[in-house]
């Protein structure tokens, strides 16, 4: 198992150690607070000293004060010395790695190598992170793919639910329309039934109205016939009476002539 080489280098300081022996000595003896104080004393009189900024940044790094260490290493980049700047980039790469900023770390190691192609530590760390980053990127891509698939699945499920809801609404709408049609048909049948009943009533009324004059005429004819019959009966009685009178008259005459005849004899 490979590990990143995060040891902060002080090689650049050793080169410029003419006035910084105490800082380097304290650092090498792991007395990082003393080294920090020493570099602070230098910066108090020479605030633009790149070597002092680098030394203080190294001391802070070993005390896990990464934030302030990063500031000091960036300030040391103002140096005109290539070796110092290369080591500052290298140490900034270490800080970025600790902060899990792999892309930044790669860029810092790359700049360190551009300034010092012979920096094996920077090359090793660059290759290590690149090797480590590829599987991580692959995992990230796989994770993104999974998330994308989950989102697509959710979208599909949502669309399916919406489709089902639409179908349900369509079915309900059809049912409502069917019920409305059935209701309208029933109402139409009721109306037609009422119309038929009304027509039948009107027909009956017309029939009755037509029958009434006929009945009246029939009654009148009947009365007329009865009157005629009565008249005929009366005439017949008169005639019978007249005939009876004639008969009596004839008989009387006959009897009279018979009596006359007898007298003559």
Image (spheres, rainbow, N blue to C red):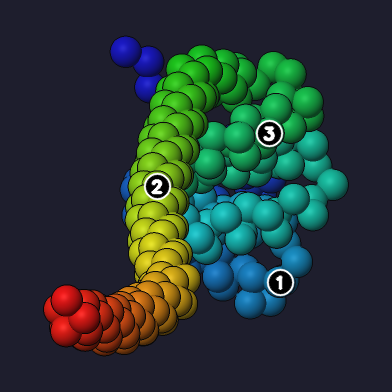
Residue with the mark numbered 2: 178
Residue 152 position within the rendered picture, expressed as x and y whole percent measured from the top left: 48, 32
Measured Cα–Cα span from mark 3 to mark 2? 73 Å
Q: Residue 107 carries which label?
A: 3
Closer to the chain start, of discs 3 and 2, is: 3
Picture residue at 71% right of the left edge, 71% below the top:
47
The answer to the question of whether label 1 and label 3 lie on touching residues, with beta carbons closer than 8 A, is no
Horizontal relation, residue 102 to residue 1: left or right: right
The answer to the question of whether label 2 and label 1 lie on touching residues, with beta carbons closer than 8 A, is no
> Above or below — where is 8 with respect to 122?
below
For label 1, the SS is loop
The nearer-to-camera label among 3 and 2 is 2
Quadrant in the picture for residue 230: bottom left
Residue 50 position within the rendered picture, expressed as x and y whole percent measured from the top left: 72, 56
Residue 166 position within the rendered picture, expressed as x and y whole percent measured from the top left: 45, 44
Q: Quadrant of the N terminus?
A: top left
Residue that lies at the very extreme toward the right in this rendered image: 80
Residue 76 position within the rendered picture, expressed as x and y whole percent measured from the top left: 70, 54
Measured Cα–Cα span from mark 2 to mark 1? 91 Å
Closer to the chain start, of discs 2 and 1, is: 1
For label 3, the SS is helix
Q: Which mark is residue 47?
A: 1
Q: Residues within 10 Å of mark 3 (few under 14, many from 20)?
A: some
The nearer-to-camera label among 2 and 1 is 2
> Above or below — where is 16 with respect to 78?
above
Horizontal relation, residue 93 to residue 65: left or right: right
């Amino acid at each position: 198992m490979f590990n990143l080489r995060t040891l902060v280098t002080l090689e650049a300081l050793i080169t410029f150690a003419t006035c910084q022996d105490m800082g380097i000595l304290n650092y090498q003896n792991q007395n990082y607070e003393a080294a920090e104080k020493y570099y602070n004393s230098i910066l108090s009189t020479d605030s633009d000293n790149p070597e002092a900024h680098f030394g203080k940044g190294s001391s802070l790094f070993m005390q896990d004060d990464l934030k302030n260490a990063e500031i000091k290493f960036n300030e040391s980049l103002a140096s005109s010395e290539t070796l110092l700047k290369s080591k500052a980039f290298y140490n900034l790469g270490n800080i970025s790695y600790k902060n899990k900023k792999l892309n930044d770390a790669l860029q810092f190691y790359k700049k360190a190598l551009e300034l010092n192609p012979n920096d094996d530590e920077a090359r090793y760390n660059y290759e290590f992170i690149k090797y480590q980053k590829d599987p991580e990127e692959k995992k990230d891509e796989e994770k993104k793919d999974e998330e994308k698939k989950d989102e697509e699945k959710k979208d599909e499920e949502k669309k399916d639910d919406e489709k089902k809801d639409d179908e349900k609404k369509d079915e309900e709408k059809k049912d409502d329309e069917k019920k409305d049609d059935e209701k309208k048909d029933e109402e139409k049948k009721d109306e037609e039934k009422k119309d038929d009943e009304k027509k039948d009533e009107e027909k009956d009324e017309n029939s009755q109205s037509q029958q009434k004059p006929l009945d009246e005429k029939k009654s009148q004819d009947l009365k007329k016939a009865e009157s005629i019959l009565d008249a005929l009966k009366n005439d017949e009685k008169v005639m019978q009476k007249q005939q009876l009178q004639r008969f009596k008259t004839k008989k009387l005459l006959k009897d009279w002539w018979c009596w006359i005849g007898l007298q003559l004899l």
